[in-house]
Image (spheres, rainbow, N blue to C red):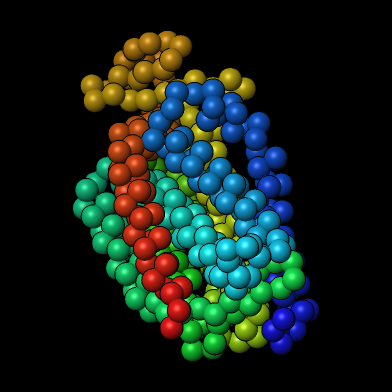
Amino acid sequence: MDDTPLSQIYLNNYFHLLGITILFYDHLLTFQDEYWHIWRNPRTGASSLFILNRYFALLSNVVMTAGNFWAFHTVELTATQSCQHYSTYRLCSLIGTQVIVGLIQILRTYALYRRDWRILTLMVLVAIGLSAGAIYVAIGPTPGVTLNNGCNITSPRHTAIRYAFAWEALFIWDSFIFTLTVVKTYRERFQYTALVGANNLLTLIVRDGAVYFAVMACAQCANSLTYYFLPSALIGVLSTFSSAVSVTLMCRLMLNLHRRAPGAHSEPTATTLDDTGYLMTTDLGFAPANTARTHADEGNETIELQLRSAAAKTAPLPWFAMPATAVLATVLVFHMHKPA
């Protein structure tokens, strides 16, 4: 047993339980919307990312929760070695969760900018730069702290301060995405100033983006401060909480867009806009996109369909990016945790 106060370790576990409680409870609250808007519609890149985001976080947090209270000891491995392996898994899970959320943010912003490759290139370059910086400053050994039932990781202060940059990089990324969203919606609002429906959708996008940014800014800044000021056993105490809130809010944002889809109701149907400018629904087939609709409806549906159409057409991007990112993160994490 180490000399870390047990009260700090218990407090760490309590904050972990707070995070997963929010995640699981919101899953129950929104499962009906998920069923009608995701599972009952044809699978697209956006809906696949929604499922990946939701259930990767759900399942990985179940394992992490068990690890926080499990007795880490086997015949082959010492308790310290087992705890080291668990901490590696936990870090990989947190990285994977944030990668998925980041891909969804890129997809939403790319669609909002009407699949502008310049914006996509800019976002990818910023993401690579922030990720490289976070990995560079965080590389280093991390000592483990074992408890009779559970595993908690501590770090010396100089190492913890390096880890804080990873969360600060996430704050910079969220600020960047929110800025792009506000700039684009501000311009579009003037372009569609006469279309009430379009403005309602733009208001929804800005509102959801503002809520996500405000909540995540508070969570990420609070978690970053733990690396600077709290005792070693409480460093990163809000990591699970921040990750769970990020996943929860992103799922809410995606469900809100699905609810705003043209014709959304208790049994929604998929709606897309093809390259010829025709509106396509699973119930009605093809019809001219401007038939029997007001100008407000046209503006509202045009922007919404661009978001949904871009999401479907950019499906290959997440799938070839995820495996490479996961492999790279795993290799780097194992390097970070090798003995000094």
The residue lying toward the viewer, choosing from 333 and 100, is 333
Left or right of 278? Residue 4 is right
Residue 300, above or below 7: above
In this rendering, does residue 237 appear at all?
no
The residue lying toward the viewer, choosing from 61 and 260, is 61
Image quadrant holding the N terminus, namely: bottom right
In the image, residue 217 lies at what x, y percent?
53, 67
In the image, residue 193 lies at what x, y percent?
39, 43
Q: Quadrant of residue 294?
A: top left
Q: Residue furthest front?
A: 75
In the image, residue 145 lies at what x, y percent?
63, 77
Q: Residue at x 48, y 30 (%)?
A: 261
Q: Quadrant of residue 79?
A: bottom right
The residue lying toward the viewer, choosing from 31 and 87, is 87
The residue lying toward the viewer, choosing from 78 and 108, is 78
Count of number-bearing discs? 0
Residue 165, above or below 21: below
In this rendering, does residue 107 appear at all?
yes
Q: Residue at x 44, y 51 (%)?
A: 100
Residue 303, above or below 209: above
Q: Residue furthest right?
A: 7
In the image, residue 154 lies at what x, y percent?
59, 79
Left or right of 286? Residue 235 is right
Image quadrant holding the C terminus, namely: bottom left
Q: Residue at x 43, y 27 (%)?
A: 43
Left or right of 233? Residue 91 is left
Q: Residue at x 65, y 80 (%)?
A: 233
